[in-house]
Image (cartoon, rainbow, N blue to C red):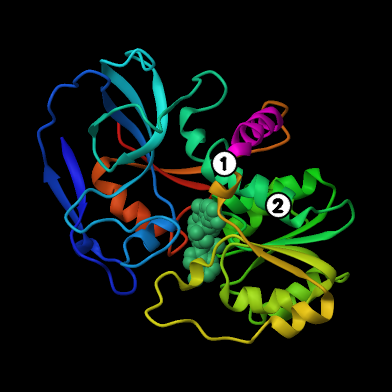
Amino acid sequence: TQTILLASRPKGLPTAEQFQFETIELPTPSVGQVLLKTLYVSVDPYMRGRMNEGKSYVPPFTVGEPIAGGAVAEVLESQNEALPVGSVVVGNLPWQQYSLADGKGLNRIPTDKAPVSYFLGLLGMPGLTAYFGLLDICQPKAGETVVVSGAAGAVGMVVGQLAKIAGARVIGTAGSDEKVAYLKQLGFDEAINYKTTPDIAQALAAAAPNGVDCYFDNVGGPITDAVYDLLNKHARIALCGQISSYNDTEAPVGPRPEGKLLKTSAKLQGFIVSDYFSRWPEGVRKLTEWYGQGKLQFEETITEGFDQIPAAFLGLFTGENTGKAIVKVA
Ligand code: NDP
């Protein structure tokens, strides 16, 4: 089977050089193991952090070892009663066409609720990130103004729709006119193309005449600087991601926001979706329910072919994806 190893650690934006394709032989499964055929691979921004050395909330990938991440796979051979042949699972798997697993950390998923790839998106890690970050940290109320950056991505598009369900006025920022049009179609009250708007601060101020009560931050950088100027008293900020700086080679510098938080008695909270691990079933249940009732829509950008995984991953940093970036492997 083919595998993709981390060849070296990138400086700045990764290039093709960092991804080494190799062919390996897989033994037949021993007792407790299953042979999996990868159906869909998830490419996610956090994986960029794992390519670096150093301590973070997930350990770094090892140079010379397969890159791994969220994937949906089908059980082809089984020596594990809990995972019969034909079952479909989601879990953390190596970037491989086929892999062996012992079943730990793999969850069987239903095939009749939604496309199985949604368990890497709406009904998986990104959807849960939106659910807990918005509802637990931002706690939007009807009539309040919510801003979400990275709004047309996997997490952002769910955040905006959940904020609408909560009755808030929702403003999103995204990097193309197509994405802006898509957000309007999803029910966002305002959407701003941050790449073409000459003055993002002015555009946000115009879109939020009553100020900002909740900010769901996916990107950091200048967009976030501008939102901080619009915070209302007791605003809540869920610090979810900072993709604008993931490829920086030096620590980003910018305006210091502390004074703005102080003056508005705002609450800023960073979080990792795994903080909510014990509540994941609740999140999946609610998201599945809203999806089933037609209250939540979801979008995927599906790239075909195992050899396209690195390109799809790099596309996250140029905004190639609308909704969840997925690679269809088989
Ligand atoms: P997305 O589907 O949103 O994909 C990334 C998007 O980021 C791109 O499509 C692009 O859209 C945008 N982007 C890329 N570079 C920049 C930039 N310099 N400035 C502004 N936007 C940029 O990814 P996810 O929904 O999976 O993740 C969104 C964020 O949430 C990420 O920061 C991620 O790290 C974080 N995250 C955090 C989790 C947690 O537990 N805290 C869990 C999951 C995700 P555009 O065209 O708009 O530029």
Horizontal arrangement in the rendering, residue 161 relative to residue 39 (left or right) = right
Identify the secondary structure beneath mark 2: helix
Q: Nearer the viewer, residue 255 or 290?
A: 255
Which of these two is toward me, 194 or 122? 122
> In the rendered structure, which amino acid carries the disc numbered 1?
Phe
The mark found on residue 100 in the picture is none
Q: Depth-wise, is mark 2 or mark 1 nearer the camera?
A: 1
Instruction: Specify whether 232 is left or right of 305.
Output: right
Q: Position of residue 188 (x, y in %)?
A: 74, 53
Q: Reading the chain from its start, which is encountered first: label 2 or label 1?
A: 2
Residue at 53%, 86% in the rendered image: 253
Q: Magenta stretch? A: 277-291
The answer to which quarter of the image holds residue 256 is bottom right
Q: Which residue is mark 2?
A: 134
Is residue 317 positioned above or below 121 on the image? Answer: below
Relative to 74, is 261 on the left or the right?
right
